Amino acid sequence: METYLFEFIEAFTHLILYITSIYSNEYFEKRRKFNALIWHCTNKEVEKYIQQALYPIKKFLLNKSLYKFRIILKNLKNEVLNIYTVEFEQFYKNYTQFSYSSFEQFVWDFFTYIEMQIYENYNIEKTFEISFDILRDDEDNILLNENLKDDWELISYDNLDIFDKKILKSMNISDENSSNPICQIYVESRKSIN
């Protein structure tokens, strides 16, 4: 399952870069993944950056310590415009194996929804960064933080009250009696100041 989640994070990153127009649409093409056509950036430098940025996340998925994955959209003044988050906490609490076909269906539903409902068209130049949070048990791990400090800054925007949170999709597992969310995907947008 962790491999599916990693591939999902990678595909999600490419999709967000496409819908937010970080790069020109000419750099994107549809590729088949999870039995769906998904936007993928074909610019070699961007692909390399994404692969390098996501590399540390593999380990955290495998040891079940990845809490949140974020793509942070910023303007060139380094002001946060939107934060796209995939939260995994419930995945670890309710871990149950589920089928690849269920996962494919979730990805298809979610990516179709994103493409149809969300299109960010800022008339400004913008940039992005990738960040992630790990579960509290690992935050105090000095060795882990030492290994990450050269390449990563563990960023948390949880305490900021200047963002509105909108859940885009929840991934659920159903048993005979109930449906349990295992993963939530949401966007946080800067609140308008009146």
Image (cartoon, rainbow, N blue to C red):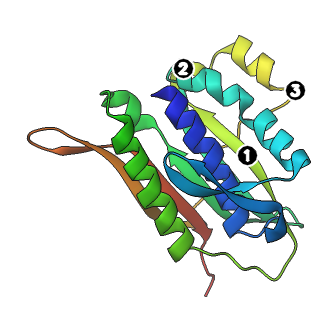
Residue at x 76% of width, y 70% of height: 21
Residue name at image x 57 percent, y 57 percent: 37
Picture quadrant where residue 140 is located: top right
Residue at 61 percent across and 88 percent down: it is 194
> Would you place residue 49 above or below residue 83 in this image?
above
Circle 3 sits in a helix, a strand or a loop, which is it? loop
Real-space CA distance between mark 3 and mark 2, rounded to the nearest whole angstrom: 22 Å
Place of residue 7 in the rendered image (x, y in percent of width and height, measured from the top left): 59, 38
| Camera-nearest label, 3 or 2 | 2
Q: In this figure, which residue is indicated by the disc labeled 3? A: 150
* Three-letter residue code for mark 1: Ile
Q: Which mark is residue 167?
A: none
Q: Amino acid at mark 2?
A: Leu
Q: Is residue 154 above or below residue 125?
A: above
Image marks 3 and 1: residues in contact by CB distance under 8 Å: no
Cα–Cα gap, marks 3 and 1: 15 Å
Q: Which residue is mark 2?
A: 62
Q: Residues within 10 Å of mark 3 (few under 14, many from 20)?
A: few
Judge by depth and name the residue closer to the eye, 23 or 29.
29
The nearer-to-camera label among 3 and 1 is 1
Residue extending furthest toward the top: 143
Q: Amino acid at mark 3?
A: Asp
Instruction: Kindly report the distance in space between the C-alpha atoms of the residues bearing marks 2 and 1.
Output: 19 Å
Q: Image check: 94 left or right of 174?
A: right
Q: Does residue 31 appear left or right of residue 122 in this picture?
A: left
| Residue that mark 1 sits on | 130
Q: Position of residue 110 (x, y in %)?
A: 46, 59
Is residue 24 in view from this perspective?
no
Residue 132 position in % (x across, y down): 65, 39
Secondary structure of residue under mark 1? strand
